[in-house]
């Protein structure tokens, strides 16, 4: 199979050099659709972005490791993600999407395949909150595996969901800085609620998704990310979100790499964000 890598022609080299072991803790693989079909009830249909495209991007950026997050367009069919992990198990880990039909054997298979967490979407454009009975049953199942749960939230929902989130009995990760709007600045209620969650011992935050809350060069997103890194330096993660599903504009990942010193302002903070934290959580 010939993989189209021409997208790299529109990507510049980042100015920031990433440290050895740098991890993209939030990225996706899509398809190829003729091998790994998209879910019939999907809310969007992406362009194919198979494992070869992801690896080529990471080699271009200087990324050493990655966490493949299952995207809703593939639903609970995690095969494309597992196939990517299997291509280089030392380099990749995964986060799955599951439902109430998954058996203990299914979870064992995912664990053996390098999966270390489950993801639930609460965002409205992807269908809104999940069935909370299923959500809690899955939480009960995966906490014994040492997994975590990834929460994809809309900013207006952070406050009303904070009570439930704060009671979760396992580590949880908030995706994309909670999608708090960069235009609203650092004095906004969703960010204050997110900071409060970040102080919990089992809370992790991904300072990714600048391209979801801002426009290039994403300068207004940087102060938000910096606050979250400073509040929670040992439980923050960074990612590219490649290939940026449902994006409003084409994103050059080099811009995201070059923002890192504005999030984590010294070498120690960058080492934690990019290397130490993901290694501890995902067992790299």
Image (cartoon, helix red, strand yellow):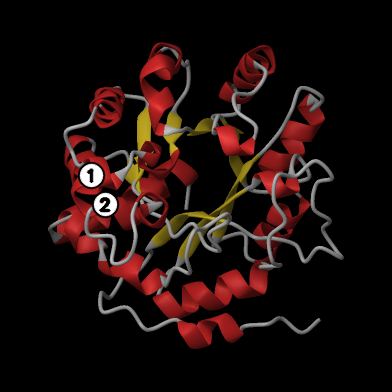
Displayed quadrant of residue 140? top right
Q: Is residue 118 visible?
A: no
Which residue position is annotated with label 1?
224
Residues under numbered marks 2 and 1 in contact, where contact means CB atoms less than 8 Å apart? yes
Quadrant for the N terminus, please: bottom right
How busy is the neighbourhood of tag 1: few (under 14 within 10 Å), some, or many (20 plus)? Answer: many
Say whether residue 123 is left or right of residue 88.
Answer: left
Residue in the picture at 24% in, 40% down: 184
With 269 as the anchor, is 280 left or right in this view?
A: right
Image position, residue 237 (x, y; %)? 36, 48
User: Taking 147 as reference, is 255 above or below it?
Assistant: below
Residue plotted at (32% across, 78% down): 14
Residue 59, image x, y percentages: 48, 78
Give coordinates of residue 103: x percent, y percent: 80, 25
Q: Position of residue 173 (x, y in %)?
A: 43, 34
Identify the residue position indicated by label 2 in the image. 221
């Amino acid at each position: 199979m010939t993989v189209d890598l021409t997208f790299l022609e529109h990507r510049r080299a980042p100015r920031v050099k990433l440290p050895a072991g740098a991890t993209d803790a939030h990225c996706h693989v899509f398809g190829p659709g003729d091998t790994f079909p998209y879910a019939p009830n999907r809310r969007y249909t992406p362009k194919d972005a198979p494992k070869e495209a992801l690896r080529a991007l990471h080699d271009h950026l200087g990324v050493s490791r990655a966490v493949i997050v299952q995207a809703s367009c593939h639903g609970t069919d995690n095969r494309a993600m597992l196939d990517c992990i299997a291509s280089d198990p030392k380099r990749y880990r995964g986060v799955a999407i599951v439902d109430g039909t998954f058996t203990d054997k299914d979870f064992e298979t995912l664990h053996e395949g390098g999966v270390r967490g489950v993801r639930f979407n609460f965002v409205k454009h992807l269908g809104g909150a999940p069935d909370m009975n299923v959500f809690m049953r899955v939480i009960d199942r995966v906490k014994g595996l040492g997994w975590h749960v990834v929460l994809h939230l809309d900013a207006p929902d952070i406050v009303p969901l904070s009570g439930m989130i704060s009671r979760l009995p396992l580590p949880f990760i908030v995706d994309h800085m909670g999608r708090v709007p960069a235009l609203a600045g650092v004095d906004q209620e969703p960010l204050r609620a997110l900071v409060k969650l970040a102080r919990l011992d089992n809370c992790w935050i991904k300072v990714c998704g600048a391209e979801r809350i801002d426009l290039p060069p994403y300068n207004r997103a940087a102060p938000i990310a910096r606050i979250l890194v400073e509040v929670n330096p040992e439980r923050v993660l960074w990612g590219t979100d490649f290939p940026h599903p449902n994006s409003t504009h084409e994103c050059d990942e080099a811009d995201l790499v070059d923002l890192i010193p504005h999030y984590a302002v010294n070498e120690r903070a960058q080492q934690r964000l990019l290397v130490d934290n993901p290694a501890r959580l995902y067992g790299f």
